[in-house]
Image: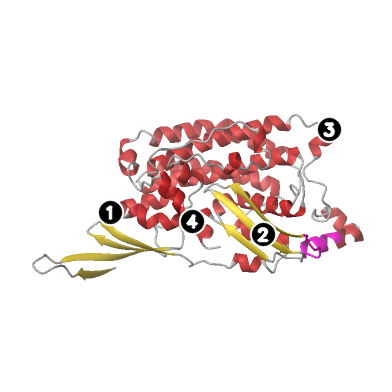
Amino acid sequence: MSEQHIRLPEGSIEKTTTTLNLGPTHPATHGVFQNILELDGERIVSADQTVGYIHRAFEKIAERRPLYQITPLTDRLNYCSAPLNNMGWHMTCEKLLGVKTPKRVDYLRVIIMELARISDHLICNSIVGVDSGAYTGFLYVMQYRELIYEIYEEICGSRLTTNIGRIGGFERNFNDIAFQKINKFLDEYPAVLKEFENLFTRNRIFMERTIGAGPISADRALNYGFTGPNLRAAGVDYDVRIQNPYSSYEDFEFTIPVGTTGDCYDRFLVRNEEMWQSLSLIKQAMQKLEQFKGAEAEIYHADVPEYYLPKKKDVYTKMEALIWHFKIIMGEIDMPKGEVYHSIEGANGEVGYYFISDGGRAPYRLHFRRPCFIYYQAYSELTKDAMLSDAIIVMSSLNLIAGEMDA
């Protein structure tokens, strides 16, 4: 922290401002990034953001890796909802390769993607509560993030950085325990979410801390390139699942919640309502799965042998399976030439992959569209003339994830 003196016209009283480094490592920041705040007392005069502290050169690394070795890189973007990043990447590959996934695969993907959205939103909204002085809600809902992670574990063996799914579908069918835990979540979480809302939505202290903090208009949000809950909180009902449906989202009924002021309170309300919509989507997907009987109920992958790993028991006992396992993992299969862009509705907004192939075994160029990196540019505008305490809660409500900013 340092002080600087501002030179004012002769006869004026000299005014002192304070420069405060909020980050890069600070208990109030949500990741490793820096905000250099100029303060007049506790009021923010200006803010300057610095990112890149955990830049890992994912896009350049991807130019040297086959498709399956890129999937773990996507885990490390928004690690609060890694399956969404994984699914988006696999759908991008499928778009380039011309792979059409079966309906059952689409519905299974919807279940996982909406669970990931809930996991992300419950973390964001409970931390908004923590940063406004309420710790109880965070501890209460965190046990249901744990249940979601147990579901991931049943499906792919991982919890946080999931590497879930494969090009064309999943690596294995969902087992009975996975479905039991999904049903348990659907049975128990609505009551918990309702109680969580009762703790905050009409809480006088919470409302006074969030209403009017960090507002942004629809025009300004669009100019910055906002997407996701932060754009919808400003009143724009843009959602990739509606605008450009993928994974058979056109088969589902759901509404897009929007706000009006784009402030911290609206962002909180939009994410809460999106959790209700995600619960509805998971229930619909579970009902749709009931129509598949017999052999159809065992389908969990498209018929793309060039990109589908053989069963492990075959790899250990059959030479042909061992060869294909090696070829797929090490990227010994040339992909078609092409240029594609595919995006999904991530928890924080539009997660997109711009993929150029020159026909080799790795992407010629791959660009990740990370929503956090885009809306963080507006942070200085959102906090100008605000109080220092508002700088923290604005950061929380935007749901800034450092891994997504620094690809």
Gap in angstroms between the C-alphas marked 2 and 4: 19 Å
Q: Which mark is residue 355?
A: 2
Specify the amino acid type for callout 4: Ile
Question: Which callout, 2 or 4, points at the residue further toward the start of the chain?
Answer: 2
Picture coordinates of residue 35 (x, y %)? 38, 62
Gap in angstroms between the C-alphas marked 4 and 3: 46 Å
Colour scheme of the picture: secondary structure
Q: Is residue 92 visible?
A: yes
| Closer-to-camera residue (223/150) | 223
Answer few, some or many: residues within 10 Å of disc 1's Cα (few below 14, many 20 plus, some between 14 and 19). some
Location of the N terminus by quadrant is bottom left
Q: Which mark is residue 385?
A: 1
Q: Which mark is residue 374?
A: 4
* SS of the residue under disc 4: helix
Q: Is residue 401 visible?
A: no
To which residue does mark 3 refer?
294
Q: How many marks?
A: 4
Question: Which callout, 2 or 1, points at the residue further toward the start of the chain?
Answer: 2
* SS of the residue under disc 3: helix
Gap in angstroms between the C-alphas marked 3 and 1: 63 Å
Question: Which callout, 4 or 3, points at the residue further toward the start of the chain?
Answer: 3
Question: Which callout, 3 or 1, points at the residue further toward the start of the chain?
Answer: 3
